[in-house]
Amino acid sequence: MKSIRTKLIIALLLITLFPIVPIYYLVKGLLQQSLEVGYNENVATALESASSLARDLYGKFKQETLSLTEDLSARSEIKAVFETRLVSSGIDSLVAKHAPLRLDFFDPAGALLNSAKVGSMPNAPQIYRNDVDPLLEHEKANLLDAIGGNAFIVAFAPVRRGQQRLGTLILTRGVDETFSKRANSVVNVYQLFKTLDFFGDLSEGFLLSFLAIYIPLAIASVSLFIYFSRKITSPLLALVEGTKVVAAGDWSFRMPVRSQDEIGQLSAAFNNMLVSLKEKQEQVISLEKMAAWRELARVLAHEIKNPLTPIQLTVQQMKDQYGGEDPVYARLIDECTDIINDEVESLCKLVREFSDFARMPRLNLSAGSLNELIEDVARLYASEPFQIHLDANLPEFNFDSDKMRQVLINLVQNGLDSIREKGSGEIQIETVSRDRVVELIYRDTGNGVPDDIRDKIFEPYFSTKKNGMGLGLAVVKRIIEEHGGTISLQSEAAVGTTFVLRFEREVENRLSESVA
C-alpha cells in the first residue's frame, strides 16, 4: 500500500513540475518577441527625440515668458500701477496675444498692490508674500519654476524708475493644456523606457518571478496531495491489517467508518462481511455439532435398543416359569418384574427420542393457517393460564403442521413446568405479520433462563430439569431452521422468557417448491 502512495506522489510531481520546462521557454519566447516589438533602438530614438523636442519647446516657452516679463517691467503702463495702484485698460492690449496669464504687483515691502488677469486661468497658483520676500533683493528677471509646475510658468522682474525700485512684477502664464499632457506623457514613457534598459534582461527577471510564484504553489499542491493520499491509503492499510487480524481468528475486529465516500463504503462492506462470515461460521459450527449429536443419538439408540427386547423376554420368562408356592417370593418376582418393565419402557422412550432426534425426516409442507394451529394447541391447555393474541391479517404460508405443533407443545410444556416451579405465572402466544415476515412470539412469566446457561439452551442433551433429556429445544431449533426460519431467546431470571420465531414467506414458498 505504501508503494501506491509513493506512485501517487510521483505521478503528481510529474504532473506538477514537468510543465515548468515548456512553460519556461514558451513564456520566455513570447516575452522576448513582445519586447522586441516595443523595446528596440528605433523606439528608443523616437522617444528620445520626442522627449527632447518637448523639453526644447517647453524651454522656449519659458524663455519667451521670461523675456515678456522683462519687457513688461520696463513699460510705463506697468510702472504706473506701482504709483497709482490702479491697473489701466492699456495693459490688456499689451499682453492679449500672450494670454492666458496673470500679473501680480508687489511693493518693495512685499505687499500685493493689485492683480490683472487676461484669459481663463482657473487652476493658476496663488502668489503669497512668503513667495515674494526672497525676490526683493533680486536685480534681474528670473523664473519661479517651483511655484508654476508644468502647467504654469511663473516669472518675476524688478520694476524701477531710474534708481528707485518701485516693486516686483510677477507674471503667471498658462501652458497649453494639450501640449502639457502630451509632453508629460512622452517624458514619462521615455523615463520608463530608460528604466527598463537600466534593469537589463527583463525576460529573465519576469521568468524568475514566475518561478517564485509557481514553485510555492506546486509545493502546496504536492503537500495537499500527500495529505489526501494518506486519507485514501490509511484506511486501506488499516483494512490490510484488519484482514490479518481476522485471519488470525479475531472475528470481533471492526473497521472504523469515518466517511460516507467509497472508502467508507468499503469499510462498512468489510464489517458487514465479517458479521455475515461470523454468522455463517456459527451456523456451520452449529450444524457440525448437531450432526455429531445426531450421530451419537443414532449410535446410542441402536446400542440401547438391541438388548431391551431380550431383557423384557427374559424377565417375563422368569416370572412365568416360577411355579413355587412361596407367596412372598412370588410377590417379590412380580415387583421386580414391574420395576424392570418400567425401566425398560423408560429406556424405550429414550431410544425413541434418540431416534427422532437422529432422523432428519422430510418436511411435509402445505399451506396453512398458523393462527388455527395455535388455537388447536390452546384448546389442549384450556385449564392452564394460557392467552393468545392473534393477528387477524396473518397470511397463510407453507409449513409442516405436525412439526409446528410439536414446536408449540414443547414450548408451552417447558413454560408450564417453569411456572409450576415458580408457583405463579402465565403463558402468552402472539402472531404478527411484518411485510414478508411472519412472527410467532411466545412469552411466559416463569423462572426465566439464567445468564450463564443462556447460550447453551439450544444444545442437545443440555437440560435444567432433573428428568429432562435436553433434546426438546434442540428439536425445536432444528424444526424452525428446517422451515428456513430463525428462533431467538430473550430471558431474565425470575421474570420470564420470550421466544421469537420468524418465518419468511418467500423462503417457505421456495421450500415448498424444493419439496415438490
Image (cartoon, helix red, strand yellow):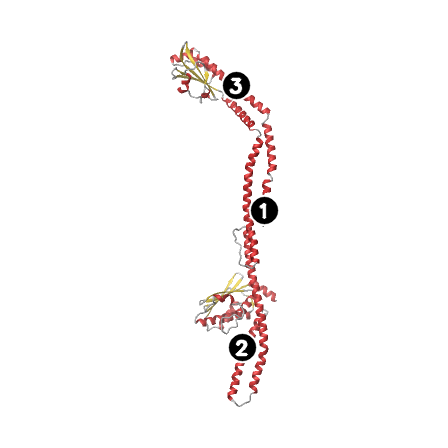
- Marked residue nearer the N-terminal end (1 or 2): 1
Q: CA distance from mark 1 to mark 2?
A: 75 Å
The furthest residue to the bottom: 325
Residue 145, image x, y percentages: 46, 20
- Marked residue nearer the N-terminal end (3 or 1): 1
Q: Is residue 483 visible?
A: no
Nearest-to-viewer mark from 2 and 3: 2
- In the displayed structure, 372 sits above or below 105; it is below
- Residue contact at pointers 3 and 1, CB within 8 angstroms: no
**In what element is the residue under mark 2?**
helix
Q: Quickly name the residue at label 3.
A: 57
**How many other residues sit within 10 Å of disc 3, few (<14), some (14-19) or many (≥20)?**
some
Q: CA distance from mark 3 to mark 1?
A: 71 Å
- Marked residue nearer the N-terminal end (2 or 3): 3
Amino acid at pointer 1: Thr
Nearest-to-viewer mark from 3 and 1: 1
Q: Quickly name the residue at label 1.
A: 6
Residue 36 in which image quadrant = top right
Out of 169 and 395, give the one closest to the viewer: 169
Side (left or right) of 164 relative to 237: left
**Residue in the image at 55% along x and 75% along y:** 350
Amino acid at pointer 2: Ser
- Residue contact at pointers 2 and 3, CB within 8 angstroms: no
Q: Quickly name the residue at label 2.
A: 346
Out of 361 and 136, give the one closest to the viewer: 136
- In the displayed structure, 212 sits above or below 320; it is above
Residue 101, image x, y percentages: 45, 18
- In the displayed structure, 197 sits above or below 430; it is above
